[in-house]
Structures are given as C-alpha cells and as structure tokens.
Amino acid sequence: MNVHLVSVVGSDVTMLPHMLAHYRNSGITSVMLNVHLRYPGDPVLEEARQVARRFGCDIAATMTGGVWTDMQNAVHARISALGTDDWYIFADQDEFHCFPAHDKGVRG
C-alpha cells in the first residue's frame, strides 16, 4: 500500500515548500500537485513547478478558470477511477497533518 499527498494550489504558493517538506518526512510515497490557474499564462504555474522540482515532484494537472473546487472535484474523480487500495491524503498547502505511529502505543 502506498500513501500519496494530493493538493490543489492556486494564486499563492508561499506555504507550498513548508507543506512539501512536512510530508516528505511523513512516509508519503508520491505527491499529486494540481495547479488551478486564474488565467492562461498565470505565473503561479511556474512558481509551483519551481517549488515542486526542489522536492522531486512534478505538477500532476492544471486547470484554467472556473472555481478551484471544480479542480478538486476532478482530482477526486480521477483518483476514485484508479480503484486502488492506496491511501490519499488531501491537504491544502497550509494543512500539516500528523499521524502517530501505531508502534508507539497509539491506536487510531
């Protein structure tokens, strides 16, 4: 079983390096970084690419226009269609989830 981080980023990627650093040390197998663009040529795409490259990941998908929840819904549908037993952590770039290890006596 693999654990994947899934996120949709938009107009600002300020917290993205912090989020990727946090999850890099949390046993994440891969990152599915999706970028919602406000308009064609939105510079946030290149900003997100630069941050992603620093952490060894790439942009999974982009969407231009509309509302960001449209992109999130498309990502949910794409993952659901995979039909795997993998785990997917959906997190905004300002969400830093922590999952205690079961071997430390914590039951989840």
Image: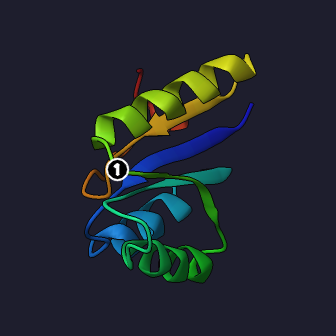
Compare residues 98 and 81 and report the one nearer the observer: 81
The residue to which callout 1 is attached is 65
Q: Is residue 16 above or below residue 7?
A: below
For the point 55% across and 22% down, the residue is: 77
Q: In the image, is 63 to the left or to the right of 38?
A: right
Tell me the quadrant of the picture where the C terminus can be found: top left
Is residue 4 visible in the rendered image? The answer is: yes
Compare residues 57 and 23 and report the one nearer the observer: 57
Number of numbered discs visible in the structure rendering:
1
Expressed as whole percent of the image width and height from the top left, the position of residue 64 reads: 42, 53
Query: For the residue carrying disc 1, how many other residues have a C-alpha within 10 Å: few (<14), some (14-19), or many (20+)?
Result: few
Q: In the image, is 42 to the left or to the right of 63?
A: left
Q: Quadrant of residue 67?
A: top left
Q: In the image, is 7 to the left or to the right of 5?
A: left
Q: Is residue 51 above or below residue 98?
A: below
For the point 49% across and 80% down, the residue is: 46
- Under mark 1, the amino acid is Gly
Compare residues 21 and 106 and report the one nearer the observer: 21
Tell me the quadrant of the picture where the N terminus can be found: top right
Q: Quadrant of residue 78?
A: top right
| Residue placed furthest toward the front | 40
**Disc 1 on helix, strand or loop?**
loop
Expressed as whole percent of the image width and height from the top left, the position of residue 24 reads: 54, 63
Expressed as whole percent of the image width and height from the top left, the position of residue 75 reads: 52, 34
Q: Is residue 13 above or below residue 81?
A: below
For the point 61% across and 79% down, the residue is: 53
